[in-house]
Image (cartoon, rainbow, N blue to C red):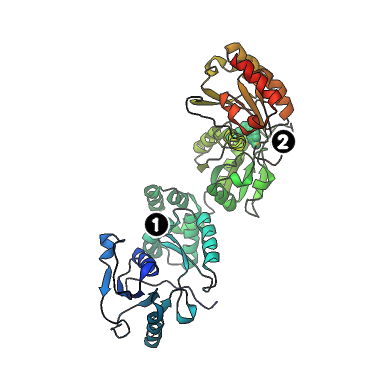
Amino acid sequence: MRFLPVFLDLHAGPAVLVGAGEPARAKLRLLLAAGARVRWYATAGRHDVSSFDVASAERIERAAGDPLTADLSNVIAVLCAGAGDTGHAMAARARALGIPVNVMDETAHSTFIFPAVVDRGDVVVAIGTGGASPVVARRVRERIEAMLPARIGDLAGFIGRWRETIKTKLPDMALRRLFWERVIDGPIGADVLAGRAAQAHQALARISNPASFARNIGEGFVTLVGAGPGDPDLITIKALRALQDADVVFYDDLVTPEILDRARRDAALVPVGRRAGKPGIGQDAIHRLLIDAAQSGKRAVRLKGGDPFIFGRGGEEVEALRAAGVAYAVIPGITAGLGAAAESEVPLTYRQEALRVTFLTAHKVADAGEVDWSALTDTQMTVVVYMGLTAAPAIRDGLLRAGRSAQTPVGVFARATRPDAKTVVGVLDDLPELAAQAAPGPAILIIGDVVARSAAWRNASPENIIPQLLMAAE
Ligand code: SAH
């Protein structure tokens, strides 16, 4: 490491900029964004500040004269960008005076260099490569950008506001660190990161005894997390974060091993779903496990296939947690119907063709018997059926009886977004056979004209599809 990252207070004095053209303007943008006052010696003779707003332009002092003889007292740094040989001479002068100097893209003349910056308000991350490769620095920055919660700066600001108060109440440094860890990792931190700052301030103000709060193993909480349809790259950044923070993960049968792999290495992984035909532990037992985990201070993740609130019992779990007074949050996921539609290019809505979408479940043939099919005969409605594989004959019969055309395009999307995904398309009349061809599940059925726009339909053998379309047209 040749360059030590330090953070320069740009309010301490003016920065001197020597140079011209786009390089100089880029440096001006950077300095002004950080609140600096800039004394600019324009080596091309012209100070072009037209691209800056009035407030920013006011902080630019358009200096005349020769920077090589100018007074540099109080100057906190010298920057040369697009200054040619004057830049080199200026650098020599600044070094002689002991003022930090940067010559753009010339490490040999510089005593400091500019890092790539992740700027989240009070949280600033600087990335350097010793000047070797700005492109590598940018790649690292992109990764850090993706990893950091959007409101991490708010969290630092929030703690900054309480710092002195807590310091007075908790003079012991070790205890104070424990206190802040618990605040950051717990529901208060989660509130700030979710943009509920007022709520977070209230919650912190309610902590009457910070020392016992810090020592307490404390209340844990539960995060309901949507794992998406199977492809691990389809989980949200927020879901990933929750998985990496979890002490324990209670997961469903539908969650793939690749997604479980993303959990924190030492998190306990507990299956709670139905497995290979065997019944699961039951919803009440799941509620109990979640509540117990939270009450013993754990950060629990309840990981569900797709989205927690689409046929995922997420509603019941949230109610059970609320009734038990356990703190919780919900992170949405890509529901299987949307995953399947995107993968197979079924536009679920389509101008003038499909104006509505219904998600329904037909787990048992008995469920299919309870569905009011007459509400689903609208030809401008796309119907997305979950858990419909075994009930496919009952679904077909119900829709036909209610009057939906036997030639309505349908698709069966099995194991969508997984490596062994299989899509079979055809017409409503053949739904049971199509379901049998696509099995085993999990599978989504999509019924509606838009299925004819899918990649599978386009690729299907013409002798299969065309006679049916012709019949439909008759
Ligand atoms: N909460 C989940 C649905 C749970 S119900 C979600 O939002 O996706 C379980 C049903 O989801 C399965 O019977 C099947 O119909 C559907 N499903 C889940 N994963 C699937 C996948 N990868 N491909 C197709 N269907 C899937």
Q: Quadrant of residue 337?
A: top right
Question: Mark 2: which secondary structure?
Answer: loop
Disc 1 target residue:
158
288 left or right of 55?
Answer: right
Q: Position of residue 393 (x, y in %)?
A: 68, 18
- Asked if 327 appears above or below 149 in the picture, the reply is above
Label 1: few (<14), some or many (≥20) within 10 Å?
some
In the rendered image, residue 373, in percent from the top left (x then y), is placed at: 57, 16
Camera-side residue of 173 and 360: 360
The amino acid at mark 1 is Phe
Residue tagged 2: 275
Q: How many marks?
A: 2
Q: Looking at the image, which is closer to me, 280 or 392? A: 392
Q: Which mark is residue 193?
A: none
Q: Which amino acid type corresponds to the residue marked 2 in the rendered image?
A: Arg
Using residue 24 as the reference point, say whether residue 275 is left or right of it. Answer: right
Q: On the picture, is 46 further left or further right than 354?
A: left
Find residue 146 and report its horizontal and vertical position in percent: 52, 54
